[in-house]
Image (tube, helix red, strand yellow):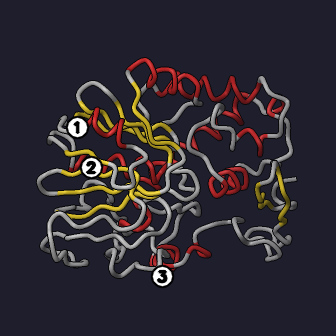
Amino acid sequence: MPEGHSIHRIARQFDSNFVGRPAAVSSPQGRFSVEAAELDGRVMTEARAIGKHLLLRFEEPWMHVHLGIYGAWDFAGEISTDAALARSEGASVRTAAAGALGQNEESLHSIGAPRRARVKMGERESGLTLDEWPPKPVGQVRARILTDSAVADLRGPTVCKVMDDDGVQALAQRLGPDPMALFETRAQAESRFVSRVQRSRQPIGQLLMDQSVVAGIGNVYRAEMLFRAAMSPHRSGANVTDEEAAALWRDWVKLLRIGVETGQMLTIDGLRGKRRQAAIDNREDRHWVYKREGLPCLRCGTSIALEMMQQRKLYWCPGCQS
């Protein structure tokens, strides 16, 4: 399932290439036809994310999408990655064509589950050339958003519906804080996170995955944040101090920003030169503990542990996180 940084990147893609333009909204698959008719012909006026939820505003109503495990957006047309998918300094440019197998998060390919995007890139970029405009829908497209120059196709989402302003506010209140959602100040977001952690006796490893505690964190960020904090995933939230909870939140702010800007969940600080390039090219070189079970900890040499916590894989170092 895409974590929060990917959804913010999708919102940026819409903001760069769809907001301010009238859109034809349809449902080639048919399951979103009634709702699509309500949005069809309206101008998209806003695109924003809260955690793993994408919100697209069409003048008054909103389109609410949660990709879940299998959902994905494919973009085609005059799509620029400059604003939406900013790359880290020195990173090589990877296009949808080059990243067709989905290993590289710096392509449009990382926006949701891996799909082969049909993308017409800018002058300095290469990509798959479109034979016709608009391109025909491929597969079971739940919703299509088409402007005069760009198209976005949505497949396999867990949630795809229309909601009003009250519904959006209710969603924001139900979810935990997101550092980039702009529904509250940074101080309010941090305070709400600390409060929701400390009022629970559940393990912190479980709380970080609870979207009502903090929005956007998934399995990768959960494992990496707890390692970076040298915190046992089994510690009760009620036993996490104010300073420790605030530090977790601020690390999430930092990692989310890096993820949105680079398109990658880079969780090892200070990477330079060949090590940074290796981290960009290979998932296994980006993380401290995630998917490194049985391997020696990069800090203390203890074997990285793997266990199940609420039916999700938990990676951690018993040496560093005792």
Above or below residue 136? Residue 126 is: below
Kindly check if marks 2 and 1 are in contact, taking CB atoms under 8 A apart as contact: yes
Residue identifier under label 2: 145
Relative to 267, is 322 on the left or the right?
right
Q: Secondary structure at mark 1?
A: strand
Residue shown at the point (45%, 42%) measured from the top left: 160
Question: Which percent across, then down, holds residue 107?
Answer: 37, 69
Residue shown at 40% from the left, 68% from the top? 109
Q: Which dot marks residue 274? A: 3
- Tell me if mark 2 has few (under 14), some (14-19) or many (20+) residues whose alpha carbon lies within 10 angstroms of its own: many
* Residue that appears at 87% across and 60% down: 318
**Upstream in the sequence, badge 3 or badge 1?**
1
Is residue 188 left or right of 129 when viewed as pictured? Answer: right
In x, y percent, where is residue 174? 58, 25
Disc 3: CA contacts within 10 A as few (<14), some (14-19) or many (>=20)? few
The amino acid marked with disc number 2 is Ile
Q: Disc count in the image?
A: 3
Observer-nearest of 314 and 29: 29
> Which quadrant of the view contains residue 228?
bottom right
For label 2, the SS is strand
**Quick check: can you spot residue 280?**
yes
Residue that carries the numbered disc 1 in the rendered image: 44
Q: Is residue 1 left or right of residue 83?
A: right
How far across and how far down the image is residue 316, in percent?
79, 60
Q: CA distance from mark 2 to mark 1?
A: 10 Å
Decide which of tag 2 and tag 3 comes sooner along the chain. 2
Q: Give whichever of discs 2 and 1 has the lower sequence position.
A: 1
Type of amino acid at the residue the image marks with label 1: Met
